[in-house]
Image (cartoon, rainbow, N blue to C red):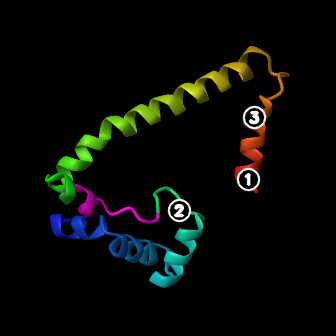
Amino acid sequence: MNETELSELLTAPGFFRFLAQQAKLSPEEVKRIYLRGRPWGLWPPDLDLSREAAETGVDVFTYLAALQPLLDMDSKQKEAQLAAYETTLTVDETTQPIPAVRAHVEKMAN
């Protein structure tokens, strides 16, 4: 992927086009699904990294690099939560899952 393709992918229309190609759906259908939050509700629907980078006066790649520590922090927090949950399972195999975790898993499964 070259820089132009990556820049296009970082725009909302480019993002929807990419997902449409991968899912073999129309871009409008992908946009409708995405805006409903399923199954790709990972980013806010109004995310436009190119615009945000331009507003800060830096290029997109510098902007993404600046976001990386925040992404790493979130990943480390999730890994710590998972490790703590795994510990409860290995300490006593009969231990029931934490109710909040069980509720979250059931919600996500639904």
Residue 18 in picture, x, y percent from top left: 38, 73
Residue name at image x 55 percent, y 77 percent: 32
Estimate how packed mark 2 is, as few (under 14), some (14 to 19) or many (20 or more) residues with alpha carbons within 10 Å: few
Residue 104 in picture, x, y percent from top left: 72, 43
Q: Secondary structure at mark 1?
A: helix
Label whose residue precedes the other's in the sequence (2 or 3): 2
Q: Residue at label 3?
A: 100
- Residue type highlighted by circle 2: Trp
Q: Who is closer to the viewer here, 53 or 34?
A: 53
- Residue type highlighted by circle 1: Ala
Part of the protein shown in magenta = 45-53
The answer to whether the residues at label 2 and label 3 have Cβ atoms under 8 Å apart is no
Q: Is residue 107 left or right of residue 53?
A: right
> Distance between the Cα atoms at labels 2 and 3?
23 Å
Estimate how packed mark 1 is, as few (under 14), some (14 to 19) or many (20 or more) residues with alpha carbons within 10 Å: few
> What label sits on residue 40 in the rendered view?
2
Label whose residue precedes the other's in the sequence (3 or 1): 3
> Distance between the Cα atoms at labels 2 and 1?
15 Å
The answer to whether the residues at label 3 and label 1 have Cβ atoms under 8 Å apart is no
> What label sits on residue 109 in the rendered view?
1
Q: Who is closer to the viewer here, 92 or 99?
A: 99
Q: Secondary structure at mark 2?
A: loop
- For residue 103, above or below residue 16: above
